Amino acid sequence: MQTTLASRIGKGLLTVNAAAIVRAVLHGVHDLPPRLTGAYHAISPFGSTSFASFAEARAFLEQIPETQLWEVAETFGSLVLDKDHKTVEGALPWVDLVPVLSVVRDRAPQTMLEIGTYFGYTTRALAQNLPGGTVHTLDLPENFTPEQDETAIPKDDFHLIKDRRVGAAFRSDPKIKNIVQHFGDSATWNYAPVKDATVFLIDGSHTYEYIKNDTEKCLALCQNRRATILWHDCDICHLGVVEYLSDLVKQGYPVRRITYTHVAVLDVDGSRLPMRD
């Protein structure tokens, strides 16, 4: 049944009152205007985009068990935190960057993959905290436009895609030499260059279909090895993320969300992966 305009407006207002304000409290009032803009696009009064309520997203979120950071990153060393790190709309804020770096530094992979480069501030931080490893990062081509999209699964965050400067944060620093930039769509990209990766950070498109695609592509590389998958935006603002991760929990994957963050983590033993639907 198609959602009525009045219902969508009501749900959008609920998102403004709840999710946007939560974001503003966590990340500062500067984060509120883009969240209000995002809520407007979610309502989509002149389009057919559907929207799920805050209550529905929270229900999925509550199905994902919580864990403390020190329970998933017991032995990490001192983090390298760049004073020039910037939190731009769509990038990891400090509250999420620190746990991601903690887990990555604890696992110390020789090869890792980040899906969703964006400006590259997170990529840069990952590289600085993995001096002995290589960070592969994947994003859409710089000249990508919605009209060029030929994939069969729906994307989101087109306002972020339009405004990004892919990898600008590390391209300008000649000291960063352990990043490999890839351009392509994670739905169709050839993952052969990262066949040895043991840590994955998924932060690309946030629709259910893309989160499912990206996760399954990464899980396929985890056969017969131990690996870790991290997801950003595991929160009430991203229904597709929390819905898919709750489905993984139901399938027997020990996905956990790190308390007080928007980060979820999965440690897998490739020899004992649960059966997927």
Image (cartoon, grey):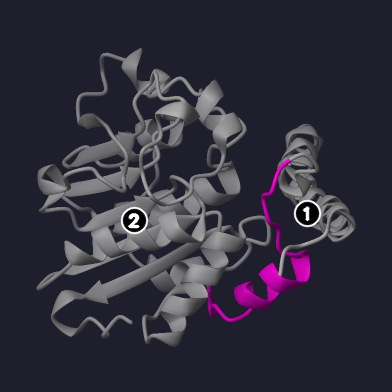
Find disc 1 in the rendering and name its residue. Answer: 22
Q: Locate residue 204: give its quadrant.
A: top left
Q: Which residue occupies 67% across, 68% down?
A: 57
Question: Relative to 170, does residue 271 appear above or below in the rendering?
Answer: below
Residue 246: where, in percent of width, then height? 51, 76
In the displayed structure image, the side of residue 128 where residue 10 appears, left or right = right
Instruction: Please give the count of numbered marks on the rendered protein.
Output: 2
Q: CA distance from mark 1 to mark 2?
A: 27 Å
Tell me the quadrant of the picture where the C terminus can be found: bottom left
Find disc 2 in the rendering and name its residue. Answer: 214
* Nearer to us: label 1 or label 2: 2
Question: Relative to 88, does residue 142 appear above or below in the rendering?
Answer: above
In the displayed structure image, the side of residue 129 where residue 2 appears, left or right = right
Question: Relative to 2, does residue 173 appear above or below in the rendering?
Answer: above
Helix, strand or loop at label 1? It is helix
Q: Which residues are magenta?
A: 47-67
